[in-house]
Image (spheres, helix red, strand yellow):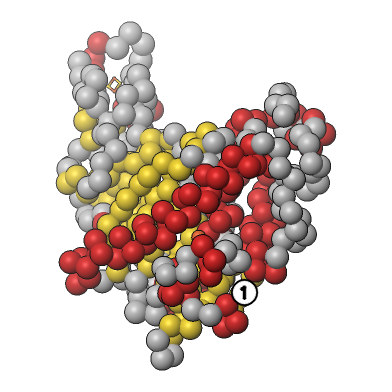
Amino acid sequence: MNTTFLPAWLYTDPVIVQRERQRYAPRLWHPLTASTALAEGQVQAFELLGVPILLTRSQGALRCLINRCPHRGVALQQPSQQPQTCRRLVCPYHGWTYDLAGQLLAAAREGDFVGSFERSDWPLMPLQCRELGGLIWVAIGPDPLPLEQQLDLVLQEAEALFAWPRELLLRQSHVLNCNWKIAHDNTLDDYHVAIAHPTTLHREQGPVRLYRHALSDHASLLATPYGEVGEFLTFGLAPWTHLLLWPDGRLALIQFPPIDPGHCYMEVCLLGDGALKPQAQVWMEEVQTFLAEDRRLVEAAQVGYASGLVPGPPHRLEQRILQQQSLYCRLMDLETFGSEPTTSVLMTAEHPGVATAPSPH
Ligand code: FES
Ligand SMILES: [Fe+2]
């Protein structure tokens, strides 16, 4: 495991953002929504790291399709908060029509194509998707880690609780003025909670002396006492995901997908029993209150990192950051790195093209 924090240039360099999109994100699974949010015969469009995606459920099968008509590239549906019920996907440009499995059923004026035309040659392209823990997970690369490996610690520590059926109660998204790794590091940081969140998250997590940590190759856990017998479980997961599990079955998913070197989204999904819907707004306000406290800190840290800071020594309560950063280095093939960007750090035999222009500071 790493014993120092990642160097600051990894938080500001556009070449690194490109490499994360090519190499880090495609190796991992991304939770998009709750399984219960997509009923039989429904379709919902999403965008994941610039990839337009359709989730469909038909004849009992969940599918993930690229939301791009193979004729001239137009999206079949626009991303929306709610799924649509439909039997067919009709392209708004020239009307090519697909079933929910992505097979082309009809094209307008089908006898008049310039060359030969076979419907079966033009399906929507599929991506891998899975359902686990009541969530729908999508992989945008062809060779992701096994999902059970990515979630190893969640399954070891809380398999039964994680599997509870849940509804998606509320989803909110904001833009943060920082690199996604600053926000991810911060949410893995158990050193700051008592100082930065004295009346919010610290009250939920309780005294630092009662913290219980667990680490695996792919995830980390902070468990804190909750009520008489339970624990409040805070899992840190790759790529930029935090899964908060309460002993009553509530689950909050916090993710920081990147936009560019200095910006990321902060997406919050609250899931739980459908009976909790009336309280979901209050719950979201509680979560957003401590995230607003974090926002000031992460945006200030980005300014510090961008000024060329050499980060100080990690504290024992920052070990979850080191764990995720070790995994990040492994997946990015950054086994060794220095305090300055160098071509040798980025250049590997397999992917020589990535290292064309590390930016100076
Ligand atoms: S782009 Fe879809 S039918 Fe032409
Ligand atoms: Fe925080």
**Quadrant of res 236:** bottom right
One can see residue 131 in this view: no
In the rendered picture of this protein, how many numbered marks are placed on residues?
1
What residue lies at 65% left-to-right and 42% top-to-bottom? Answer: 305
Residue 306 screen position, x and y as percent:
64, 37
Is 258 situated left or right of 288 in this image? right
Estimate the x, y position of residue 338 in percent, counting from the top left: 81, 42
Residue beneath the point at 43% across and 48% down: 266
Give coordinates of residue 114: x percent, y percent: 33, 8
- Quarter of the image that includes the C terminus: top right
Mark 1 within 8 Å of ligand 2, using the beta carbon? no
Above or below, 61 against 245 in this view is above
Q: Quadrant of the N terminus?
A: bottom right
View extreme (bottom): residue: 228
- Nearest the eye: 308 or 233: 308
- Specify whether residue 132 is in view: yes
- The residue positioned 46% from the left and 50% from the top of the image is 295
Report the front residue among 6 and 347.
6
Please tell me in which quadrant of the rendered image residue 118 appears: top left
* In front of the other: 342 or 138: 342
| Rendered location of residue 214, percent (x, y) | 62, 74
Q: Is residue 192 left or right of residue 163?
A: right
**354 up-or-down from 28: above or below:** above
* Mark 1, secondary structure of its residue: strand
Q: Is residue 212 above or below residue 50?
A: below
Q: Amino acid at mark 1?
A: Ala
Mark 1: few, some, or many residues within 10 Å (few <14, many ≥20)?
few
The answer to whether 53 appears left or right of 324 in the picture is left
Q: Which residue is mark 1?
A: 214
Q: Quadrant of residue 40?
A: bottom left
